[in-house]
Amino acid sequence: MSPFESLDPRFHRLINGSVRLETLYTGCRWAEGPAYFQASHSLIWSDIPNNRLMRYDSSDGHVSVFRQPSNNTNGNTIDREGRLVSAEHLGRRIARTEHDGRITVLADRYQGKRFNSPNDVIVKSDGSIWFTDPTYGIDADYEGECAESEIGASHVYRIDPQTGAVTIVCDDFVKPNGLAFSPDESKFYIADTGATHQDNGPRHIRVFDVTSGHHLSGGAVFATCSHGLFDGFRFDEAGHLWTSAGDGVHCYHPDGTLIGKIKVPEGVANVCFGEAYRNRLFICATTSLYACYLQIRGAKTY
């Protein structure tokens, strides 16, 4: 059975009807934060409650533990030098894994106060690092360690690539979560999963205009989740947004129309594109890692 559900004719050219959803690994408690390394043909992802980072070798299908303990790492991405950048719940920080395995702390405080529990992270082409900081890792001891918020709110931050200075770029979110730039970096998209903490709270993705490289304006709702909550998401090179949801992966046209879905048997947390042509979508969904080939390439990310 095809995993694809087409809701709009524009979805047809993005998919191959003969492709099946592949289960690459199962046995996680909460799979999250996939990041693909072209140089080593491998995918790193988080198993947050099990406090480990996992590694999938796409050349032979082998799965191994990349690092344990992992400080309950959640989101992961890759910088311009091919290094792993991670958002740690337990460490309450953004950290980078150097090529020799050393860990460099990039940011763990704002104006002297510890972050809540950095959730998802992305690197812009200028080397700046943008991340969200909801409270999920300090709300309980399951994905981090229960604690009071020192900052008292959940914001979106930017780390300057030259100075390392941390600034708030968005301060009007309930629980900011997944984030990504459009392929040309003219727009910035952020999910708000505030419905986890507020009755009738937000369950949408907002879109901002980017000016002068790091100033944001706008913030209109781009899409509202029709099943569960959005979490992590990524773009293909044509500007379609592929996002996690409760019933699989939802694909949105750049105009905000939901045009299709990839049906997954577990709630999806995050996705990323990988392999030589960036045409394989890796899907972290609750206990498992899935993958599916598409007819379009993912946008290049750093």
Image: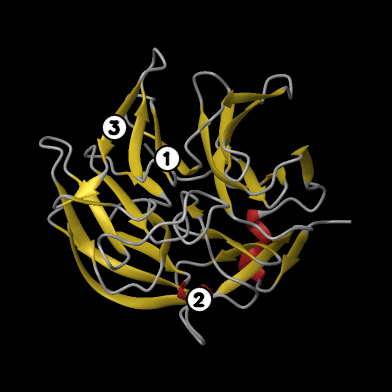
Distance of label 1 from label 3 (alpha carbons) = 25 Å
Task: Provide the residue designation for mark 1.
Answer: 300
Residue 250: percent from the left, percent from the top? 61, 64
Q: Alpha carbon of mark 2 to alpha carbon of mark 3: how far?
A: 31 Å
Residue 241 on image: x %, y %:
50, 60
Of the two numbered discs 2 and 3 in the rendering, the one whose residue sits closer to the viewer: 3
> The residue under label 2 is which amino acid type?
Arg
- Contact? badges 2 and 3 (CB < 8 Å): no
Q: What residue type is labelled 1?
A: Lys
Q: What element carries label 3?
A: strand
Q: How many marks?
A: 3
Left or right of 118? Residue 146 is right
The tag earlier along the polypeptide, 1 or 3, is: 3
Residue 52 versus residue 224: which sits nearer the camera? 52
Question: CA separation, marks 2 and 1?
Answer: 27 Å
Name the kind of residue labelled 3 in the image: Val
- Residue at image location 61% in from the left, 70% down from the top: 259
- How crowded pointer 3 is (Cα within 10 Å; few <14, some 14-19, many 20+) is rated as some
